[in-house]
Every structure is written in structure tokens, then in C-alpha cells.
Amino acid sequence: MKKLTLTFCALFALLVVAPAIYADGPERYSGKEKEVMQPAPPVCDFYRAHEWDLGIWAAYAFAADDGQFDVLDDDPFVPDDDPFTLDIFTGFSAEPAIFNKNERINIGQVSKNEMFGRDDVFGGGVDIKYFWSRYFGVGIEGLGLAAKTNFAGGGLLTFTARYPWGRFAPYVTGGLGFIGGGSTLYKFFNEKHEYGVLIDPLVPTTQINAVISEREYWTVDPVSNNKIRALGQLGAGLEFRVTCHIGLMADFTWNFVFGQDRDDKLHLNTQQGTDTFLFNGLVLSQTTVINQALELRPGNGSSNQDFGMARFGITFSY
């Protein structure tokens, strides 16, 4: 009976332990080494702390004050009498060149914007940034804009805050610096004279250096800004990393130009000449002719120069 009991206990132990031993099946040996699968390399961190960024971009800028003033084609001189020489014996008359200079008078501002001389311009720039963390960085920026016949350019110190999200990083930026150049359009009254030598038909030996033609016309011309002004910048944008080191960026900034203003001033321009009356080449009398006109002299300031700017470019990060 004891032997039977021991036999049943042994069988029971085998039934309990055997499934646990052979749960994964019997081990097989092929005689070859087992192949080990290497894990995939980790994806790079697109936005990093202690990162240097170089950005190169094109820009489209538009003036905050667009449009033009309507300046009429007026003759600013009152009266507009040119000096002349008259021989009362022969009836010969001409304007002496020595008294009749070319006239060019600024009669009014045309472009409302005093930075571009037009409503919008194209340009570009470059910036370098250092991010001491994934989220915050400082940098320097240089920009240039193709203002009317006069380049406008400047530089800024910038601060950028970004929020990386995968390959994307929306950001806000601000800066403070300077800008120079640019121009304003003004209208000018012009009077041009062509000089030549005229011969008295009755007294061929008498010659006079005179104006042989005269033309009055108006032009709209840029007047350059010659002062450096302060520049402030606020904006927001988005960067997309194509690779770990190359990205695309687009943003919009509003740029404030400020500083001390010196307004346009009116100046009284005086043109003086002499009417000369001759008798057979001899001077009988002379009369002074004085013409006066109010001329606008442009000032230098920062008013009416704010502008918006959209930028599109490529970034290189290291």
C-alpha cells in the first residue's frame, strides 16, 4: 500500500511540473549562432538647447501711410516776369542769360509715406540667433529694402521665444535697432532756358548773349532721408524643420520708426533780374525785376515711416 501511495505522488508531481518545464516547447539547437536584431537609431532632436541658427530671407514690406497727396501744377512765382533786353530803336528783344537762371522750386510733398517714397517695396536680410534653451534665444538681424531710388537698411538686436512641437516651432520675436536711408516724393516746378547768341538784324555788329528758348514743367522726384532713426520690431511666425539642421520659416513683423522730428519748412525764394532798355545799343534805362516764390525745404524725422513686413526664408541650425 505504501508503494502504491508513493507511486501516485510521483505521478502527480510529474503532471504539475512538466507543463511548466515544456510551456515554451523544447529548446532547439541548429548549430548556428542566433541572429540578433539591432534597434533603430533614435530620431534626432529638431530643436535643441545651445543651438546656433542662421536665417536668410526675402521680404515684402508695405507702408503704414500709403497713397499720395494731390499737388497741383502751380507756378509758385509771383509775379513770374523774366528780365529782358529791349532795343526800342530796332524793336529787338531778348532775355539776357546773365540775369535769367534756371529755376527749380519744391512746391509740395507727394508721397504720404516718408520711408519708401511708394506704397510697397521688396527686400531681404539675414539674422543669426543663439538659443540657450529649446525655447528662448537672442540674435542680431540685418535688413535692406529697395526704397524709391534710395536704399533703406538697418540692424536690430532681437529676442525670440519659440514652442517646439515635432518638426514645427511657432515663435514670437521682438527687436530694437536703427534704420537709415529711404526717401520722400516731392513735386518741383522747373523752368529751363536754352542760351545762345542773337544778332541785331539792323545792327549786325551788335550781338547779345540771350535766352533763345524757355520751357516750364513739373516733375515728381525723391528727396533722400539723411538721418539715422530708431527702429522697433514686433512679430510672430512659424518654422518647419525639413531635416535636423535645415528649416523653412515665414513670419510677419510690424516695424516702428521713431525719433526726433524736424518738420518741413517754407523758405522765401527770391529771383532778381533787370529789364534793360536800349537805343541803338546804348542803355537808356534799367528796371529791377524781383520774383518771389515759397519753396518747401524737407525736414528729417521719423513720422509716417512705420511699415509691415512679411518674410520667407531658410534656416540652418548647428
Image (cartoon, helix red, strand yellow):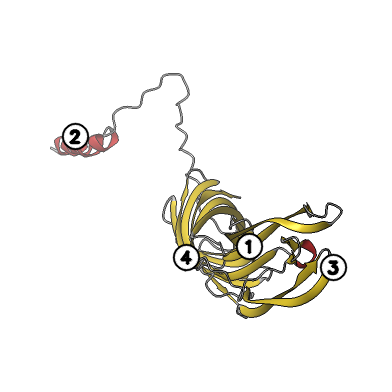
> Where 243 sits versus 148, above or below?
above
Looking at the rendered structure, which numbered label has been put on residue 278? none
Q: Earlier in the sequence, mark 3 or mark 4?
A: 4
Q: Nearer the viewer, mark 4 or mark 2?
A: 4
The answer to whether 253 appears left or right of 217 in the picture is left
Q: Earlier in the sequence, mark 4 or mark 2?
A: 2
Q: Earlier in the sequence, mark 1 or mark 4?
A: 4
Q: Are marks 4 and 2 in contact (CB under 8 Å)?
A: no
The answer to whether 16 appears left or right of 218 in the picture is left
Q: Earlier in the sequence, mark 3 or mark 2?
A: 2
Q: Nearer the viewer, mark 1 or mark 3?
A: 3
> Mark 4 sits on what residue?
68
Q: Rounded to the nearest whole Å, what is the CA distance between mark 1 and mark 4? A: 21 Å
Amino acid marked by disc 1: Asn
Task: Report x, y in % for residue 18.
Answer: 24, 34
Q: Residues within 10 Å of mark 4 (few under 14, many from 20)?
A: some
Q: Nearer the viewer, mark 3 or mark 2?
A: 3
> Mark 3 sits on what residue?
282
Q: Earlier in the sequence, mark 1 or mark 3?
A: 1
On the question of residue 172 being in view, the answer is no
> Mark 2 sits on what residue?
11
Q: Nearer the viewer, mark 1 or mark 4?
A: 1
Q: Rounded to the nearest whole Å, what is the CA distance between mark 1 and mark 3? A: 33 Å
Task: Report x, y in % for residue 32.
Answer: 46, 20
Q: Which corner quadrant of the image does residue 226 belong to?
A: bottom right
> Where 22 sits versus 291, above or below?
above
Residue under the point 29% across and 33% down: 24
What secondary structure is marked by label 3? strand
Q: Residues within 10 Å of mark 1 (few under 14, many from 20)?
A: some
